[in-house]
Image: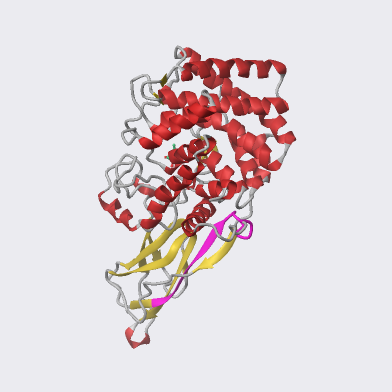
Amino acid sequence: MDFLKKAYNLMPVLRESIARPVSGIPEGRTMRDGDSFMLDFGTHVVGYITLAVNVEKPGGDTADSPLAVEFKFYENLCEDRSKVYTGGMSRSWFQVQTVFADNPYEPLELPRRYAFRYVKITFPANTSYAVSYKDCFVRTVTSADDSKPAPLPAGTDPLLKEIDRVALLTLKNCMQTVFEDGPKRDRRLWLGDLYLQAKTNYCTFKNNDLVLRCLYLFAGLPHEDGCLSSAVFQEPVLRGQSWILHDYALFFAGVLADYYRAAGRKDVVEELWPVAFRQTEIAYEGFEKEGRRAPVNMYFIDWCPSLDKSCAALGILVFMLKEALYLAEIAGTEAQKETLRREIETVSETLAAMYDPSEKLFCTSSGQLSVHSQMWAVLAGVLDPAENASVMSETLRRKDLVSPVTPYAMHYFIEALIRSGLKDEAFHLIKEYWGGMLAKGCDCFPEVFVPGHPDASPYGSVAMNSYCHAWSCTPAYFIRTFGG
Ligand code: RAM
């Protein structure tokens, strides 16, 4: 059976529930001709909205024209800035819809799925009749089972508890027929995002089949040379994205290794091992072709415009070659293991040579010092444990390093701290960074967060940013795996 067929057979059933607004209901108000109101659902929801109104026609006549209703959805109220958006990403991602109801007496369910906390509803037309609020609700959808996450142990730090709660909601609202990056935009399965979502899933919602479905989707939609796409579109047709990222393709080995650790399915490793191994071949070829350097334009790492990725990219390459070797021990040939060992040694040597003893840090080829270089070099494990701990302590001490702008990159910073024995510092940082998002009133964790820079956006406007982005859900993984 081919991979896409297997993915299709693992299509999850979506669980539904009903959510109603908690405030903003315009009790008793009659509205038309530009009148509007804003409902607040109290938290982030993903699903299909229904609105019902009473028709108020003087003299008891029935409505004599369609009812126009304009809906504007907001995950975050800053999305109102969409009016002046000039960035390159399509404006059609903004969540607005105007509907013309021929029968205003019927409840109106919008066919599109929306992700939001607030909805502004306007009646723009000069109808001869007015309307008043009758009901509004959202049929929410997710493939996550709320009963699965275990309660945190009594005595867990209250801030960590709150961070965990919001992390779970973030992941849940992104768990649909695949692990979506964000339910507002791009609603797409990305390999780099999947790696972190799957890790968190195993210790929360435990939907192992959804991870497996996503692995099959990637495996079933490779480029001609076997390289995996960085993302998969389900709509308008199922296809792989053309953009190739070596780090994302390499993470296939990471996702598969974690899947094996969680689900213990040797048959899946045997089946998907050739796909994982091919990604290491392609990434290693890229390294050789570039004169034993990383082809940095082929690596994502973070949405950090000034970042020199030369060191971090090598760190990811070593880290994933090691994950591939772990898989090779289960399903690979002797020759493949040998190749991987040799590659790990070669790339590790190149990376270790980037350590600058005078700075006590890794330094890129252009002389840049970044958190990204340190965390990935440490995760690659090219120094001994004491040196790794010293690199991470120095990283924490220095305030002049280029720093992560996404919770995605921040995840690896935390992981590198924990792996080098600095668990208290890691949890302090979780509380500071993710706690900082809570202090800003986040209902879910966003795609981008830079303390002190509320306007940070890779897209030219915060209106385009996603405010429920699953790559930011990993505190739940840290809290549940390493305690508080
Ligand atoms: C953003 C997406 C996704 C990420 C890519 C590289 O556009 O939201 O989460 O993986 O960047």
Ligand 1's quadrant: top left
- Which residue is pictured at 52% across the width and 30% down the height? 379
Above or below 139: residue 332: above
Residue toward you, 92 or 322:
322
* Left or right position of 192 against 271: left
Q: Is residue 39 covered in magenta?
A: no
Q: Percent position (x, y) of residue 462?
A: 32, 48
- Which residue is pictured at 44% across the width and 75% down the height? 105
The answer to whether residue 388 is visible is: yes
Q: Quadrant of the N terminus?
A: top right
Q: Percent position (x, y) of residue 192?
A: 51, 37
- Which residue is pictured at 25% across the width and 50% down the height? 84
Q: Residue furthest right?
A: 267
Above or below 145: residue 473: above
Q: Percent position (x, y) of residue 458?
A: 34, 40
Q: Which residues are magenta?
A: 133-149
**Residue 311 lies in quadrant:** top left
* Left or right position of 191 against 43: right
Q: Percent position (x, y) of residue 298?
A: 44, 25
